[in-house]
Image (tube, grey):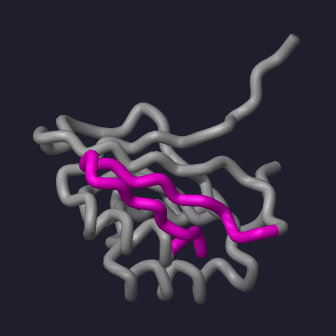
Amino acid sequence: MTAHVAQYTLDVTDLELMARFWSAALGYTVSQGGDGNAKLYPPPGRAGPTVWLQGCGTPKPGKNRLHLDLVADGGQAAEVDRLIGLGARRADVGQTGAEGFVVLVDPEDNEFCVLDGPPR
């Protein structure tokens, strides 16, 4: 038996902001109840885990120990620009520029990467 990734959970302080950012970034739809949480679903026909945005009252304490690696449908540079336009920012975590990925943070400073192609 093995396990597979079914869902990615992210603690957030501003649920509305983070639901807007991540749904636009991933092209996912949002289902938000009145419980302070939201679930994001991939578009029909696209495989992928759901994303659970879990409302919490505390800010992020430090660097993520787990993060998303995204691959764009188009080019990496255009995708980085699009995500920055949605509210992401570049982050320096010690990369040299030769890694094949760009490190960004979302509006609540959660790190994620945009790869230059499928993982190698």
User: Percent position (x, y) of residue 18?
Assistant: 32, 63
Which residue is painted at 49% across and 86% down in the image?
82
Which residue is painted at 33% across and 43% down in the image?
54
Which residue is painted at 52% across and 50% down in the image?
51
Which residue is painted at 33% across and 72% down in the image?
89
Q: Residue furthest front?
A: 34
Front position in the image: 25 or 91: 25
User: Percent position (x, y) of residue 98?
Assistant: 61, 62
Q: Residue furthest right?
A: 1
Instruction: Please tell me in which quadrant of the rendered image residue 60 appears.
Output: top left
Front position in the image: 27 or 89: 27
Instruction: Please tell me in which quadrant of the rendered image residue 11 appears.
Output: top left
Q: Is 31 one of the magenta-colored residues?
A: yes
Q: Is residue 19 above or below residue 68?
A: below
Front position in the image: 26 or 40: 40
Q: Quadrant of the N terminus?
A: top right
24 to the left or right of 36: right
The answer to whether residue 79 is visible is yes
User: Percent position (x, y) of residue 38?
Assistant: 39, 54
User: Magenta part of the protein: which range?
Assistant: 25-44
Q: Is 118 one of the magenta-colored residues?
A: no
The answer to whether residue 98 is visible is no
Instruction: Please tell me in which quadrant of the rendered image residue 116 appears.
Output: bottom right
User: Percent position (x, y) of residue 73?
Assistant: 74, 78
